[in-house]
Image (cartoon, grey):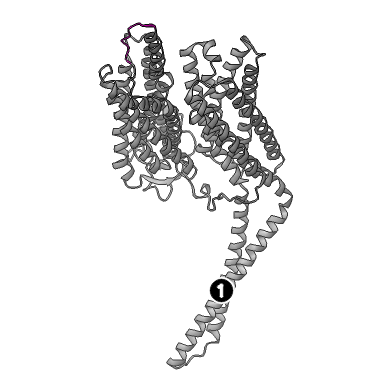
């Protein structure tokens, strides 16, 4: 029997669902393909499986790079003879050069292809995140400049790698900051796997740079050895260590490096968060109803007590910070400065905790719907808040153990113990408040739907009435009219049509106003809740700002009070502080962004 045999390909076990219909603009959509799922009968299912496979393999690439770099860095700590710090710098320089090549290719090639960026995520890369990338990137560049100057002064006993590595770091920071500022919202639709691997390689490189900054205490150890050398000189012993000479320029480079050290770790963490959102958005297609037509804006109205209390906390905090810095720059801070510093925290942290608990209760009393739409940025915000809080919580538990094991009855030790316990409670309550607020649907969405519906009905009715009037006038129009009168009639008709349109717009505005008034009246019983949420959010924003400023610009009593350092040892406590302090600074900065979102949507 002759005939055409139709080959039926058996679909894979991943693609047993119904074939999805191809959208009308399929010529603009680049569906992902992967060799494991080339036999899928459905194009849409093949695309989804290829997307998951691309994420898996790019994640495995990042995991292997991170493990390799971690092994190198750990070898420097435990066996610094076989693997030196210069070897780690060479490895990281190679990774940075690869990242620079991919970023350059993305900027000049991938992003400029036809239909490469069909969608941009409105929630990704908010201005405060991109601004923090530029801010911390600028301080990191200045940090590397100080490092280059410090190594140049000590070039007789320093390796040339210590000058080349910061130079490559400066180029890497500038290129990455430019890339994130202009392309953090991209939902790239071409070269999916290459883009995912490039993003994951960049994330892994930033993580390794953060890990190296956490564990590398070279200059801090040199400062300690310099103090020991001064003691030996007074004792009459000769020293040959590589220390900073007694010159002003060397002291400036050394002090600037120590002061700007936390900014580099902060920059790496912020870049990792932005790059992760970009990685999640590769191949993502955003429908129009997911994009808000009206974005809530920041308005400073209806808040009085929050700004007043927050400003008071900032002023008092700045005064305490300046007194602490004056004592720290002159000599070691005395006992009274530590007591004053921790007393300020002990007063402020319970107030912030109580306010956050009240805000969470108000969220529970509200009847706003939860926003269940897919939002990678919001999911990452919740993960980062919980993850960054671990830095402060870990340091607090280490302090609690050290104090309880030594002398908890001492005044300063009891203050530090109270500070550690209150800090843990404040982080937990604030996280619950922010995450609950981020998952609430903004009230402006309901207002927009209602306004759109009424406005659409009004416009439709005005168009129908306009058509009826035009039809009636055309029926009543005489058959024979002179040319002069014909122009006059046309002008009169144009004036009438303009007046009618003007009247319809006025009526439309009145209708929208009626709808707005009725909406406000129907939700008048929630006004006090919204006001309270705005007051609470604004107060917490200002408190988190001052709690971000104090550790960022040099107030580190957790390292300078000497209690934990003497209990755990210098190197161990240095690693703990360098792990927890950047996370705590990042937590405060990220909390400010989350609280502003809660304030705006309240």
Q: Quadrant of residue 372?
A: top right
Q: Is residue 241 magenta?
A: yes
Question: Can you say which quadrant of the picture contains the N terminus?
Answer: top left
Q: Quadrant of residue 32?
A: top left
> Which residue: 30% across, 18% down?
86
Is residue 311 or residue 285 the one in the foreground? 311
**Frontmost residue, 7 versus 481:** 481
- How many numbered circles does the render carry? 1
**For the residue carrying disc 1, how many other residues have a C-alpha within 10 Å: few (<14), some (14-19), or many (20+)?**
few
Quick check: 213 above or below 450?
A: above
Report the residue marked by disc 1: 502
Residue drawn at x 52%, y 25% is: 327
Residue at screen point 54% across, 21% down: 558
Question: From the viewer's perspective, is residue 293 above or below residue 395?
Answer: below
- In the drawing, does residue 76 fall left or right of residue 537? left
Q: In this view, which residue lies farthest toward the right?
A: 525
Q: Is residue 165 visible?
A: yes
Residue 354 is left or right of residue 338, and the answer is right
Magenta: predominant secondary structure element? loop
Residue 377 screen position, x and y as percent? 50, 38
- Indicate the position of residue 148 as horizontal and vertical percent values: 31, 27
Q: Which residues are magenta?
A: 235-242
In terms of image quadrants, where is residue 373? top right
- Residue 290 is situated, as x and y percent measured from the top left of the image, at 52, 47
Circle 1 sits in a helix, a strand or a loop, which is it? helix
- The percent coordinates of residue 200 (x first, y second) are 39, 29
Q: Is residue 57 visible?
A: no
Residue 178 versus residue 145 in the image, above or below: below
Horizontal arrangement in the rendering, residue 294 relative to residue 432 (left or right): left
């Amino acid at each position: 029997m002759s005939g055409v045999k139709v080959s039926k390909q058996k679909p894979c076990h991943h693609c047993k669902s119904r074939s999805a219909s191809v959208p009308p603009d399929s010529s603009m959509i680049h569906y992902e393909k992967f060799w494991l799922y080339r036999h899928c009968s459905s194009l849409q299912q093949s695309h989804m499986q290829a997307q998951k496979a691309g994420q898996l393999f790019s994640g495995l690439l990042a995991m292997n790079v991170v493990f390799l770099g971690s092994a190198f860095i750990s070898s420097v700590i435990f066996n610094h003879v076989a693997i030196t710090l210069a070897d780690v710098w060479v490895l990281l320089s190679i990774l940075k050069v690869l990242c620079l090549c991919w970023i350059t290719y993305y900027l000049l090639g991938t992003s400029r292809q036809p239909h490469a960026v069909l969608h941009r995520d409105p929630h990704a890369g908010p201005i405060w995140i991109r601004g923090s990338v530029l801010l911390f990137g600028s301080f990191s560049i200045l940090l590397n400049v100080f490092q280059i100057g410090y190594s140049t002064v000590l070039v007789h006993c320093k390796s040339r790698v210590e000058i080349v590595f910061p130079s490559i770091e400066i180029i890497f920071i500038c290129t990455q900051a430019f890339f994130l500022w202009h392309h953090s919202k991209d939902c790239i639709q071409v070269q999916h796997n290459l883009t995912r691997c490039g993003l994951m390689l960049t994330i892994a490189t930033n993580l390794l740079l953060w890990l190296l900054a956490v564990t590398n205490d070279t200059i801090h150890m040199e400062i300690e050895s310099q103090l020991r050398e001064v003691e030996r000189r007074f004792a009459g012993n000769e020293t040959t260590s590589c220390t900073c000479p007694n010159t002003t320029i060397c002291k400036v480079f050394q002090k600037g490096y120590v002061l700007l050290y936390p900014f580099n770790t902060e920059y790496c963490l912020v870049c990792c968060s932005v790059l992760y959102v970009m990685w999640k958005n590769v191949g993502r297609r955003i429908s129009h109803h997911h994009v808000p037509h009206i974005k809530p804006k920041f308005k400073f109205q209806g808040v009085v007590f929050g700004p007043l209390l927050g400003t008071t906390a900032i002023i008092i905090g700045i005064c305490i910070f300046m007194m602490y810095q004056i004592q720290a720059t002159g000599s070691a801070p005395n006992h009274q400065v530590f007591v004053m510093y921790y007393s300020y925290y002990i007063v402020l942290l319970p107030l912030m905790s109580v306010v956050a608990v009240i805000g969470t209760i108000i969220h529970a009393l509200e009847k706003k719907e939860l926003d269940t739409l897919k939002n990678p940025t919001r999911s990452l915000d919740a993960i980062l808040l919980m993850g960054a809080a671990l830095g402060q919580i870990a340091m607090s538990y280490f302090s609690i153990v050290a104090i309880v094991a030594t002398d908890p009855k001492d005044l300063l030790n009891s203050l530090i113990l109270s500070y550690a316990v209150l800090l843990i409670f404040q982080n937990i309550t604030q996280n619950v408040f922010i995450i609950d607020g981020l998952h609430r649907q903004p009230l402006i969405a309901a207002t927009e739907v209602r306004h759109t519906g009424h406005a659409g009905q009004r416009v439709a009715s005005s168009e129908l009435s306009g058509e009826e009037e035009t039809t009636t006038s055309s029926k009543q129009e005489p058959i024979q009219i002179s040319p002069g009168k014909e122009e006059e009639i046309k002008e009169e008709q144009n004036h009438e049509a303009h007046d009618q349109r003007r009247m319809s717009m006025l009526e439309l505005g009145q209708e929208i106003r009626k709808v707005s008034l009725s909406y406000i009246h129907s939700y008048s019983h929630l006004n006090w809740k919204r006001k309270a949420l705005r007051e609470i959010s604004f107060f917490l924003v200002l408190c988190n700002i001052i709690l971000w400023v104090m550790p960022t610009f040099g107030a580190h009593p957790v390292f300078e009070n000497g209690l934990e350092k003497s209990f755990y040892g210098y190197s161990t406590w240095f690693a703990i502080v360098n792990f927890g302090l950047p996370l705590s600074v990042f937590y405060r900065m990220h909390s400010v962004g989350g609280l502003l979102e809660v304030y705006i949507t309240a």
